[in-house]
Amino acid sequence: MINMFEVNETNKMIEQENLDVRTITLGISLLDCIDSDLARLNEKIYKKITETARDLVKTGEHIESRYGIPIVNKRISVTPIALVGSAACHSPEDFVTVARTLDEAAKTVGVNFIGGYSALVSKGMTAGDEMLIRSIPEALACTERVCSSVNVGSTKCGIDMDAVKLMGEIVHQTAEKTQEKDSLGCAKLVVFCNAPDDNPFMAGAFHGVTEADAVINVGVSGPGVVKTALEKVRGESFEVLCETIKKTAFKITRVGQLVAKEASRMLNIPFGIIDLSLAPTPAVGDSVADILKEIGLEQPGAPGTTAALALLNDQVKKGGIMASSYVGGLSGAFIPVSEDQGMIDAVTAGALTLEKLEAMTCVCSVGLDMIAVPGATSAETISGIIADEMAIGMINQKTTAVRIIPVIGKDVGDTVEFGGLLGYAPVMPVNRFGCGAFVNRGGRIPAPVHSFKN
């Protein structure tokens, strides 16, 4: 039973501490749209999305109005298009027509992003997979709302280094195709290891083949709420610190559970999962970096940062998992540079480097996220960075990802403005030594020995 104190407490979190539901994401299976005729395929995809999601935005707005809970984004994820389009698409250009269809469907129903222009190639690429991957630069350049992801590794399969090498090239081509917008296309492209089937957050969302025909997934976020709670226990022991984070995460997640169940009821679509991630925004007071500073670090990147982030991530999961019947997605703390004012400040101060961010990803939800690097960074170096991050995910049996932006025409010391939730980012230096002989070997890195648990 929720009492008046808890109602007032939740109102305070929303009004003063930036608590929000970051996204309601409607996952839609397109497997029944598969057709060998490209025109019919596009027609079926458009019809399925617009019919299934026609009330999504209206429902989100109704819940916002009724409960006073901000719902920042309404989004759609679909079955990986490499699977859906392979029968009809015989060239990268054919796949681009599907991207345009997704974009039009997203505009028609009013969502801000649609994810699932994706391929799953952790053990190897089919002809369709490779064509979709090669189409990504043009697809992201000619659309506004389409997001793309490619899963190139897993704990069970190892890492497809051919795909890693190709993705370094694709990231660079995407940067060049969208250079007039500061290479913004790369902000909508994620390379994964161990990608989850039910992630509601962009740009990595897709609707996995293990999912139902349609599901509602919700992502909650409240870094400001956690920071405010920790201010009240400043100087206390780790036991008190952990209990405070855990209890706060419970309260945050319960709000998401309410929204998810209500959206599921109104749309008559099954509830999937709550992703209880701490996802920051560029707004002041909505920063994961500020939580790390409140824990006791002068700046993120200082000695102790990885330990502090591990503690935060674990306690968020422990608290949140008690507040929802189904927790999934990524669930933990995000550390995107451009989307977190505290992370931006740490990079500017010289406290946070690419290498330290890589170390931090061993214990957080994702990986190297929304990081701007010099436009002259080679495709081989980007592939090497991707390979390192994939190895962390494979060995540690966790999801890791890379969303890196080589900003054409920019160098270390420059700043890049992306706008909105994507924020802005200082261009970070990259290790100048090459890895070409490594990434050009070809083939696959085998799965680690601890993957054999059958």
Image: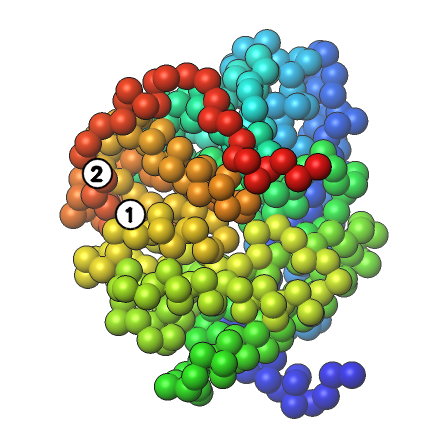
Q: Residue 228 sits in which quadrant?
A: bottom left
Q: Considering the image in quadrants, where does the N terminus appear?
A: bottom right
In the image, residue 195 above or below residue 62: above
Question: Residue 279: horizontal and vertical position, in percent?
Answer: 49, 59
Q: Name which residue lies at 48% across and 60% down.
A: 333
Q: Which mark is residue 213?
A: none
Depth check: give the residue in front, 75 or 110.
75
Q: Is residue 308 left or right of residue 254?
A: left
Q: Name which residue lies at 76% across and 54% down.
A: 271
Depth check: give the residue in front, 361 or 157.
157
The residue singled out by tag 1 in the image is 355
The residue singled out by tag 2 in the image is 431
Q: Residues within 10 Å of mark 2 (few under 14, many from 20)?
A: few
Q: Name which residue lies at 23% across and 46% down.
A: 428
The answer, for residue 151, to whether it is visible in the render is no
Q: Secondary structure at mark 2?
A: loop
Q: Report the amino acid beneath label 2.
A: Asn
Depth check: give the residue in front, 342 or 70.
342
Q: Residues within 10 Å of mark 1 (few under 14, many from 20)?
A: few
The answer, for residue 88, to whether it is visible in the render is yes
In the image, residue 13 above or below residue 98: below
In the image, residue 53 above or below residue 377: below
